[in-house]
Amino acid sequence: MSLEIRKFSMRDGRDIYEMLQEMPADENGFINPVSGKTFEEYQEWLKKAVESSNQAGVVDGWRVPETIFWLYEDGKPVGFGKIRHFLTDALCERGGNVGYAIRPGARNRGLGKRFLSLLIDEGHKLGVDRMLLTVQNKNKPSICIALANGGKIEKVTADRHYIWI
Ligand SMILES: CC(C)(COP(=O)(O)OP(=O)(O)OC[C@H]1O[C@@H](n2cnc3c(N)ncnc32)[C@H](O)[C@@H]1OP(=O)(O)O)[C@@H](O)C(=O)NCCC(=O)NCCS
């Protein structure tokens, strides 16, 4: 099995689009903005997302730049990850620096754990030395993966774990 992480680009094609159609719009707080969209809408989203990832400061007055990465297993896309370059107060409460999802049919084979490790490396390259994950308490696999990647729990509230890596 070969695993590879690739930064997104405006040239991403149908293989990514098809993966995104298999992922829900919102799963445990991880947002997939392309769920239910047409291929043309996906291409438009990619264009805007690439532009905003290249901005230095807050985008549109509230969004922070984020860079998207895909995980490929043997040449097939299996993961969607996002790294926010810095945090606002709101993102310290909800969202954090890193979010990721594995394609439903590819779960429970250790890919989530490997993907987070690769995303941490990419975060370092972007200058994100410490990353916050805000994980819903019910999301046991995600908590387990963050801890397996060296995460330290800062606090646990009624609905979330705040984990720093
Ligand atoms: C979270 C997610 C990425 C995990 O992906 P995955 O490829 O299935 O994860 P892995 O196979 O690497 O590991 C899952 C770990 O959770 C553990 N796990 C799974 N279900 C569990 C449960 N109910 N309770 C405790 N641990 C559980 C597994 O045993 C495994 O740990 P191990 O390697 O020590 O055995 C995937 O479920 C997903 O995409 N969810 C939707 C989006 C999401 O929740 N993203 C995270 C929040 S941003």
Image (spheres, rainbow, N blue to C red):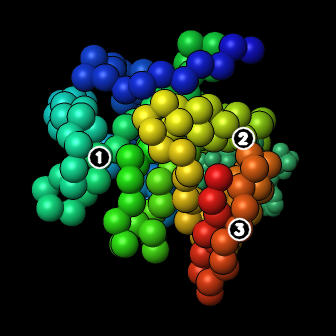
Q: What residue sits 34% from the left and 44% below the top?
A: 66
Q: Residues within 10 Å of mark 2 (few under 14, many from 20)?
A: some
* Residue kind at label 3, given as amino acid type: Ile
Q: Mark 2 = which residue?
A: 113
User: How far apart are the alpha carbons under marks 2 and 3?
Assistant: 17 Å
Q: What residue sits 55% from the left and 59% below the top?
A: 132
SS for callout 3: strand
Circles 1 and 2 in contact, beta carbons < 8 Å: no
Q: Is residue 134 visible?
A: yes
Q: Mark 3 = which residue?
A: 153
Q: Residues within 10 Å of mark 3 (few under 14, many from 20)?
A: some
Coordinates of residue 104 in the picture (x, y in percent): 61, 42
Residue found at the very far left of the displayed protein: 60
User: How far apart are the alpha carbons under marks 1 and 2?
Assistant: 24 Å
Task: Judge depth for marks 1 and 2 and give the one in front.
Answer: 1
Coordinates of residue 67 in the picture (x, y in percent): 37, 38
* Residue kind at label 2, given as amino acid type: Lys
- The numbered mark at residue 65 is 1
Within 8 Å of ligand 1, the CB of disc 2? yes
